[in-house]
Image: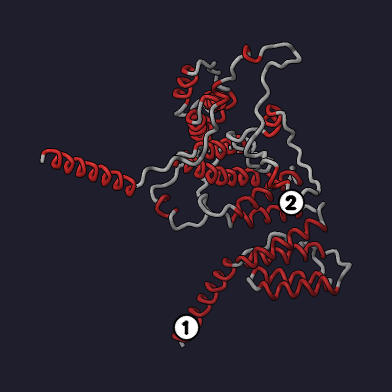
Amino acid sequence: MVLNRRTVRYVVVLAAALGTLVSCGRKKYENPITKDTQQPDKVLFDKAIADIERSRYEVARLTLQTLINTYDSSEYLAKAKLAIADSWYREGGAHGMAQAEAEYKDFILFYPTMEEAAEAQEKVCDIHYRQMEKPDRDPLHALRAEDECRQLLVQFPNSKFAPLAEQKLRNIQEVLAEHEFRAGLFYHTKGSYPAAANRLQGLVNQYPLYSQADEALWQLGDSYTRMGDRFEEKAADAFTRIVRDYPLSEHADSAREKLLAMKRPVPEADPVAYARMKYELENRDNPGMMSHFWGLFKKSPDTSMAAKSGTPTMTAFRPTIPASIPAPAAAAGAAGVSADVSVSTVTDSTALDTKPDARQNPPAPEASGSASTGTNTAQAKPADTASNQPLPSNHQQPPKKKKEKKKKVAQKDTQKDSQKDQQKNDSQ
């Protein structure tokens, strides 16, 4: 009898412990309906919410769809549609996230004035934020997350989710900027300085809050310096921005020396930029000792270096035109040729054979003097040598191949042998 009582006691304690674990494992629903009523539509909604909390998502969606189809004038229609989206969001996976995004978009479209609309937009941003990959991978989800977080700040600026979305946007732009920086650094190391300058110029203009923006400006100035004298103004602008906007950078002193060597004015440090940079250095998250090791096995990027203050960029990134490409209007105006393209029917079948190709013989620029003004063309001032230099190219001259060297060595050897034979014949 005593043994039976102990057994019953153990069973009761074990059941209570299992019940506690189950209740702790349940995740409460974020948007329940607290109204105490026994209306049929409310009963269906509560049953679906209980299924969502127990991870029975398919059953919950069937119940909510029954509510929507049966009680088309119910006051819980909006909540039911949001609950369907939340069930897909909780289910996760690529398919679940795609379905959740579509449901959230429909909810925002039909109920844009409800308080939950901002939360739905935040969930759409979070869907792509959670699928964002490292900077050396495809930036598709990072670009989508940037658009959705920017949409939240534009459409719901006073929402309680706005500060969180703003920080997420800074983290996303850190990843996108790192993606552009690695591409620019690759081109710079390779020696393709026009391509490197194009990538780095777009980076520093679009993402000034990037943690390595000063390094990008330094590489940008070096790229313009190596591209020739005609890009000296752009190089000086890059060094000026380092001194003015990033005064605590390790390249600040070197940038001042570069400006002095170029005989350019050295600007004063911007106090607002100085305060922001000091705040970032003091509040930057320091990664742990094993963070680099475990980061190899993580799919998500490391955003510990992202900015904690400042307004993120609210415009989409647009690639810039490389500086080595001349402006069409300026080039056409200098040559006296219009840049407009016209189409007409060719009636002469021998035009391709008789008329020269205009691309092979471009018109020469007009001289500074003309007969109408009475000036002598021989007395015209020569053009600037820097502007007449050929534009830099991304294609570097390939090194001489080993086969060519071997051929030259073989030719020299044959020449020496022939000379020796000739000397022997002369001596005989």
Q: Position of residue 251 (x, y in %)?
A: 46, 28
Q: Which residue is mark 2?
A: 118
**Which residue corresponds to the image point at 65% horizontal and 42% vertical from the top-left?**
318
Q: What's the amino acid at mark 1?
A: Thr
Q: Which mark is residue 111?
A: none
Drawn side of residue 117 relative to residue 190, left or right: right
Q: Position of residue 377 (x, y in %)?
A: 65, 15
**Which residue corresponds to the image point at 54% horizontal and 77% vertical from the top-left?**
15
Q: Quadrant of the C terminus?
A: top left
**Crowd tier of the residue under label 2, counting other residues whose Cα lies within 10 Å: few below 14, some 14–19, many 20 or above:** many
Closer to the camera in the image, 378 or 385: 378
**Cβ atoms under marks 1 and 2 closer than 8 Å:** no
Q: What's the amino acid at mark 2?
A: Ala
**Which residue corresponds to the image point at 50% horizontal and 36% vertical from the top-left?**
193
The image shows residue 415, relative to residue 113, as above or below, that is above
Q: Which residue is mark 1?
A: 7
- Specify the color scheme: secondary structure
